[in-house]
Image: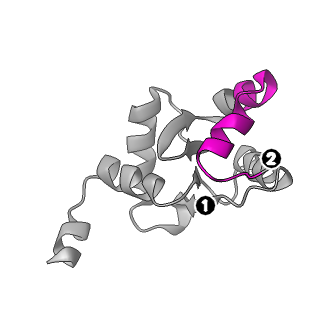
Amino acid sequence: MATTTAAVEDPIERIERLAAENAVVIFSISTCCMCHAIKRLFCGMGVNPTVHELDEDPRGGEMEKALMTLLGTSSAVPVVFIGGKLVGAMDRVMASHISGTLVPLLKDAGALWL
């Protein structure tokens, strides 16, 4: 029964489920330079994000459209979730990093211990 549910799972529900499974989740496209930059940012901070490469997922196109809907933008990646909550795309993550609010978010989610 579970496989049937997964096969018809709504893309937004799937995104929310995947985002809730780990402290930091990035939805990415493997050839996207902005996605690479955001992954390097987190790794450089000592955070080990879970990355879902949409171009390597059979339902990645549906998920990408759902992410655009969630963000209200025309570009879907990279999209970052911390502690199961949507942080946003590159601009929101960088603004949070610059303002000093990113580290507390990561600590609260259990992704950063320092």
Callout 2 amino acid: Leu
* Alpha carbon distance from label 1 to label 2: 13 Å
Residue at the image position 30 percent from the left and 51 percent from the top: 13
Above or below, comparing residue 81 to residue 73 in the picture: below
Residue 46 appears in view: yes
Segment tinted magenta in the rendering: 94-113
Q: Are marks 1 and 2 in contact (CB under 8 Å)?
A: no
Q: Secondary structure at mark 1?
A: strand
Q: Which residue is mark 2?
A: 41
Q: Earlier in the sequence, mark 1 or mark 2?
A: 2
Q: List x then y, in percent, for residue 37.
A: 79, 47
Callout 1 amino acid: Val
Above or below, comparing residue 32 to residue 48 in the picture: above
Q: Which residue is mark 1?
A: 51
Q: List x then y, in percent, for residue 90.
A: 68, 35
Q: Is residue 2 left or right of residue 64?
A: left
Q: Main secondary structure of the magenta part?
A: helix
